[in-house]
Image: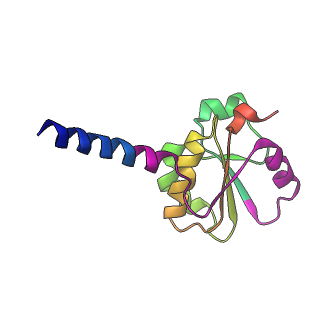
Amino acid sequence: MGTIFNIIILGVIVWFLYQRFVPVKGIKNINAAELKAELNNKGNKQFIDVRTPNEYRGNHIKDFINIPLNELGKRSQELSKDKEVVVICQSGLRSSKASKALKKRGFKEVTNVKGGMSSWR
């Protein structure tokens, strides 16, 4: 009985880690250097920063609007599904979560900035 329980627990842990860290199909990941190129070629893009308002006020990139991760569900209608969405946070974890949420809401082109503001210079 104990062995079956251990296998189930191990399976849940593996599933959780898989869901958490495996990239979602259709989400592009870029680094800070690639973001600079994206900002020079804004075109048909919209930029969102999913950090808290205090983090955003402390330091942000000019072209990014602040939509905190906890508000993204109710504010995603402010974004156009026809434009690429570039998402940033402090380290890349919240923006990855936000990117997955946007993809599930039907956004076709979603780009996550790996390393977030911590890697921006």
The residues colored magenta run: 16-45
Total labels drawn: 0
- Image coordinates for residue 27, horizontal then vertical, percent: 62, 59
- Image coordinates for residue 33, horizontal then vertical, percent: 83, 44
Which residue shows up at 75% across the image and 61% down it? 45
- Image coordinates for residue 3, horizontal then vertical, percent: 18, 39
- Is 106 covered by the magenta stretch? no
Please name whichever residue, 31 or 97, is drawn nearer the observer in this view of the structure: 31
Q: What coloring was used for the rendering?
A: rainbow
Which residue shows up at 38% across the image and 49% down it? 15
Left or right position of 13 against 71? left
Residue 60 drawn above or below residue 105: above
Please name whichever residue, 51 or 26, is drawn nearer the observer in this view of the structure: 26
Which residue shows up at 71% across the image and 31% down it? 118
Task: State the quadrant of the N terminus.
Answer: top left
The image quarter containing residue 92 is top right
Please name whichever residue, 39 or 4, is drawn nearer the observer in this view of the structure: 4
